[in-house]
Image: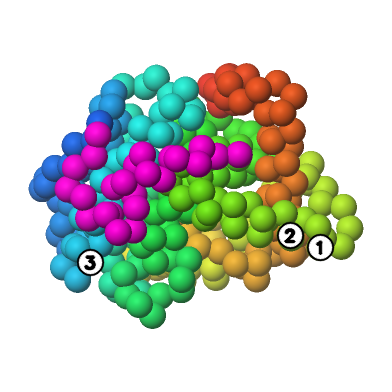
Amino acid sequence: MFPSGAWASIPECHEAQASAAVASGVVIEEVKSDDAQLQLLRVTARRGAFMHIYFDENSEADARRYAACLGTQLNLHANELLDQRTGAQLASVVFTADLNYIPARGEKIKTRWVIFTDPKALEGLRPRPMVIKTLPHEQIHDFQSRNGAIAPLWFEEGHATWAGLRITGMLDPEAARVEREERLAELRSANGPVNLSGWGQRKVKRETILRQVSPEDRVQMESDPNFYPKDGSYTFTIDDFETDESMAGARYAAALLMFEGLEQRHGANKVRRWVLDVTQLRPK
């Protein structure tokens, strides 16, 4: 499913060499931060695509260690998504040792995914799994939303899982294999139909948002029942939704299999072009 030699061809993403200062087609610069509490690296790839890497004083080593790998991903994403944009900004990341850190949010602030460097953080939120598994998936969503297109959740998550696993597989084939198998295992153990067409008819509990926003946004939410902070990244569990999300894992797998089926029938490049067409459509 993935090129067996990909790992060796991208050594800056290898755990033993992740501190590489440079990577082919990637420029890493120290720039003035727009956040008084964090330092900032700007990582630029081909065609000028870029992302910001924020970090606190206790997380500088990890931020620099993975900067080249994150830049390499920008180029891999552009190839996978047939993304011809010039100077596109992708989602940012924040490396922090503060387990209580809440990322800045706002209409003019690019989404910031938090990567915790404290060893006490949940395994999935630590640097390597976030960089190798989570960011490839989430940057797909950033691309999907570039024109404000609104697609069914099965399409958005199926595409992000399919394409994200392809990127992960180029960085770490074994990690991609394990991730795919874990998703399919949930589908095999599902009790009942996954109902992909009904996926997305859910609502996040208000208290879930309240605990992940700044004190200022919390005050406004408590005074205005209709206010929700726009944009930004949030972390959810099954218990954070008002609807039953016990089938979520199986739905991710089913949506992935739909895209894999389309790939087998029509070829990966036709699937990419179809996704490009769908996500270029602006809502009326």
Q: Are marks 2 and 1 in contact (CB under 8 Å)?
A: yes
Q: Amino acid under label 2?
A: Ala
Note whether residue 141 is visible.
no
Q: How many marks?
A: 3
Q: Out of 87 and 163, give the one closest to the viewer.
A: 163
Q: Considering the numbered disc 1 on the image, is that residue within a helix, a strand or a loop? A: loop
Residue 205: % across, % down: 61, 65
Q: In this view, does 186 lie to the left or right of 70?
A: right
Q: Which of marks 3 and 2 is nearer the N terminus?
A: 3
Picture layout, residue 278 above or below residue 89: above
Q: Residues within 10 Å of mark 1 (few under 14, many from 20)?
A: few
Residue type at mark 3 is Ser
Q: Which colour scheme is used?
A: rainbow
Q: Is mark 2 on a helix, strand or loop?
A: helix
> What amino acid is found at the position of numbered circle 1 in the picture?
Ser
The spot of residue 41 in percent (x, y) is 18, 48
| x 19%, y 63%: residue | 61
What residue do we see at 74% from left, 37% from top? Answer: 258
Residue found 21% across the figure and 50% down from its top: 20
The span from disc 3 to disc 2 (Cα, nearest Å) is 35 Å
Mark pair 2, 1: CA separation = 6 Å
Q: Which residue does the numbered mark 3 point to in the structure image?
A: 59
Of tags 1 and 3, the one toward the viewer is: 1
Check residue 185 in the rendering and tell me which mark sits there, or answer none.
2
Q: In this view, does 169 lie above or below 277?
A: below
Task: Classify residue 270 by image quadrant.
Answer: top right
Q: Say few, some or many: other residues with alpha carbon within 10 Å of mark 2 (under 14 / 14 to 19 / 20 or more).
A: few
What label does residue 189 carry, if any?
1
Residue 96 is one of the magenta-drawn residues: no
Q: Which region of the structure is painted magenta?
A: 1-24
Q: In which quarter of the image is residue 190?
A: bottom right
